[in-house]
Amino acid sequence: MFVPHTPAERRAMLDAIGVPDIAELFADIPASLRLERPLALPRPLSEAELLGELQSLAAQNADLDHHPCFRGAGVYDHLIPAAVPQLASRGEFLTAYTPYQAEASQGELQALFEFQSMMAELTGLEVANSSMYDGATALAEALFLATAATGRPEVLLPRTLHPEYREVVATYLAPRGLSWQEVPFNSRTGGMDLEQLSALLGERTAALVVQNPNFLGCVETEAARMIDLAHQAGALVVMVVDPISLALLAPPGELGADLAVGNGQPLGNPPAFGGPHFGFLAARADLVRRLPGRLVGETVDRHGRRGFVLVLQTREQHIRRERATSNICTNQALQALTAAVYLALLGPAGLAKVASACLHKAHYAASRLASLPGFRLAFPEGVFFQEFVLEVPFDPFSLDDELAAAGIIGPLPLYRRLAGEEWKHRMLVCVTEARTRQEIDRLVALMGRGGSCHGS
Amino acid sequence: MAADPASSPPLLCERGAPGRRAYRLPPLDVPQRPVDQLIPAQARRRMPLRLPELSELEVVRHYTTLAHRNWAVDVGFYPLGSCTMKYNPRVNELVASWPGFSRLHPYQREESVQGALEIMDRLERYLCEIAGMEAATLTPAAGAHGEFLGLLLIRAYHRERGEEACRREVIVPDSAHGTNPASAAMAGYRVVVVPSNPRGGVDLAALKRMVGPATAALMLTNPNTLGLFEEEILDIAETVHQAGGLLYYDGANMNAILGIARPGDMGFDVVHLNLHKTFATPHGGGGPGAGAIAVKQALIPYLPAPRLARDPATGRLRFVDPGPRSVGRVKEFHGHFGVLLRAYAYIRMLGAEGLREVAETAVLNANYCQALLKKAGEYEFPYPRFCKHEFVFSARRQKQASGLHAIDLAKRLLDYGFHPPTVAFPLIVEEALMCEPAETETKETLDAFVRSLLDVAREAREEPETVREAPHTLPVSRLDEVRANRHLVLRWQNPGKREDRRLGEAP
Amino acid sequence: MYPKDLLYTSEHEWVKVEGSKARVGVTDYAQKELGDVVFVDLPSVGDTLAAGQAFAVIESVKSVSDVYSPVSGTVQAVNDRLSDSPELINQSPYGDGWIAEIEIANPSELERLMSAEEYEASLVGEEKEESKEDKTE
């Protein structure tokens, strides 16, 4: 369908090759392997038919444009300036390969260099790579780095880590014989329990992971202390962070962390049903040779003009093969570029305003919801940014049904996502700058009414 | 020592002015409490946040300037071997931008995303049919991620047979993509390299000596990285299986055999498919990709979370727990849906005949270029065979005559308006150039490309300095990679000194 | 080209024996094959090495090469200047580009190393071997 040859051209090409037909070019495939039937696929569609089919499939989805979303848990509905997708989807960026031929790829390379610069700035660390698949695999790879750098076999994960991150880390660590333990949290603040942390840190600990805000939305106000404890035990610290929050919250570098990772989706990328997003990975400068993923560096051309190239490629699989720091090849360059455009448009003041709007709207929602009869904040002494755990007097799943019926993507029921009966009546509420007061008020009203419909 | 900023487009941090704004948020419509009451001081950012401050038009011009300095399939021919740089249909971009797909939260109730789940379910089935396998997962983010997952499945398979401890080795050919050995190492395996034979295939006799009770798997690309079909694939498969090992198919080169032959029929147990190559989702300057995995029956129990299943009662699709034998989870959420959607749209538009035509034309185009180049006699061709979707030739003659390397020829080709083939890979061919035209290029383009390659060969003989110094017509000349690696500059310096830098900007 | 006072390995390391110490580097042939060196991963003082063990890594822009210890022993000193100036390997392979000094544990191992003449002869053989391989293509 996207093949351009006319029958005459095809004939001329076969003649130039010196074969009677195309089948001759496949003659080295053993006869028993040649598929003698067409693939069992539905009949081809014209573009118009395809659009029709996909429109009807899209119509079966409740999208966030028409359904206010109070769900976060790692993916956040932020406002995206119109110029972001317009610029990032230019064909020159969209249809380029990895910039291996630097002279023909200066645009992509400069954009990624700028991305690295801004991610280093946001995280307060010295270097950032040009993207990973997602936050969870970025964390797993950062933990590989930590175990290699320290020569130690175990990592500590907070029990409040995003559960899917924990699952990914567990899957990655197992085949290398590495292990992990969980650090419990304080049931009043929702933050990591410092005493238990001290007890768990030891000579086997390669790294401590601190998620901030953690999966429960709680800000780890004692992060600096945790990092000190981990460093005293000779471990590295990897922080899992939300990039928007870093305009307001202390960045990993300022707190003394060695590495920072996270899902970069909040920076100008749509939720897209979970992907493609991008992972970011930033580190102290002395760890740069152990980093996975591509890095862009500045240099000069033969005339002394500034230019950019991929650097430290000897870390990567195409050169170091089984001794590479990672197997990653294809990454998330387009999503990283999207984030760079977003940051360029928002600037420091814009990003700070986004963070501040999330903070205030979430606190407004929290105070209204917590004042409903029978509702309360699960961590009354906790500090939060844009998400908080709400204890509700009804079955959260029924409440969710009600909210869905009212056209709202409601807070996330936590039961079964987190182990334990204590989560049975708890929901994770997320309020970003994209939610209006009217939407919040409507959520509050509906949740309050939830009681009258569904006695518990 | 530092590069002169005026010599290239300004960096973002060299544009703009303090206080300039590009985007305005809606007014805050909720009551505010003092931030100190909400977040204690020790948890708040103290470091200044030094990001650029620009107007919207400045940002638009910045990225437009950068776009003009970037080669892409939309700009011109991109015959990068092993990368399958085919045309990416525009309609895919349109549908991927629809809110009904792009504005979905991954933790939405399954009832509210049935259209998205339907696409994933159908795509899983299409990929199984195309690869000749029994079940698929769309979770992996990229080909290498699929390799890692595939090896975890293989590990789980051997574990249940009590052989995990002894099956410690993964065999890869010396022509393999670097991701194969890197993935094997990440999955905790020792890598053993099997040599290639003079016809460019796996040396079967050597393989037979290598396999044994320590063999966990053989990883193979077919057609391989030389663009050649493994003629002895059935013997290879039998050899590995008889030794108790499994066969892993690196689907990077699947474009060559779509609808013509299937890895499952060849004996492969696990397959990854690079949806971003074979099924025309744009490569984005390095990503995103999607590296779906398809497996035979015996490996289904080990597939990762989440699994997609249809509720027989309601007919609705939902994510289900993969069960205790699963390897676990390798990625947050459920894969790169935006990429999966494009692959789905592509397969729907092409159908069975269209996909077969893709493979036939990709192979026709590669053989056509190879035939013209061979006839001209300028370059050495290490393997005297028809190729599949790509071919490898050598600049060894140019190296001996003029001391030029494949990379020099590649850089000169840029001056002729073509992206060069992959250079210095596969490792087993000296001064390799690896060329994959893809099926979407016209005969005129292929003819012009071949002429340019021959012109470059002539220049290499007659005026080698022109080639050595290339490129001459691009925004920058040859870049100093040695300097870039010895003196690492990985981020902009002194963004606070933007004022000084802007004075140095070109008008 | 290949100093007479040094001993050589088939992996292109040179050894300068001074009493019980062996100073080790890579040969001029090796540095030319490697191209511009951009990074050297040095061993640590006190590391115990077996003859033939990889103990340092030399990187160019697109290649990585192990350096193997010609003798068994303990690392006594490393050339820290290579951390900031890896180009010394190219500029002065037998002088400022030395890599490490090793306290020799087993002097009899030195007998297995090559003289300058033997090393030079082995290089001719290596080049011939290369062109023979090429012909099989």
Image (tube, coloured by chain):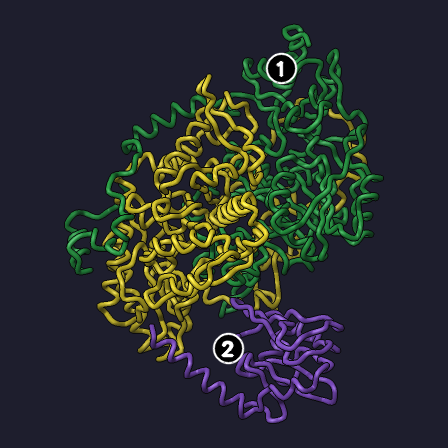
Chain colours: A green, B yellow, C purple
- Residue at 60% x, 46% y is A172
- Left or right: A179 as drawn, with respect to B169: right
Q: Amino acid at mark 1?
A: Leu
Residue at x 34%, y 40% (from the top left corner) = B130
Chain to which mark 1 belongs: A
Q: Quadrant of residue A364?
A: top right
Instruction: Confirm whether residue B192 shows in the render.
Output: yes
Q: Categorize mark 2 by other alpha carbons within 10 Å: few (<14), some (14-19), many (20+).
A: few
Residue to which mark 2 is pinned: C33
Please determine whether, in this image, residue C9 is positioned above or below residue B152.
Answer: below
Q: Is disc 2 placed on a helix, strand or loop?
A: helix
Q: CA gap, disc 1 to disc 2?
A: 70 Å
Q: Residue at x 52, y 58 (%)?
A: A317
Assign the N terminus of chain B to one quadrant of the image: bottom right
Q: Position of residue B414 (x, y in %)?
A: 37, 62
Return the mark for residue A399: 1
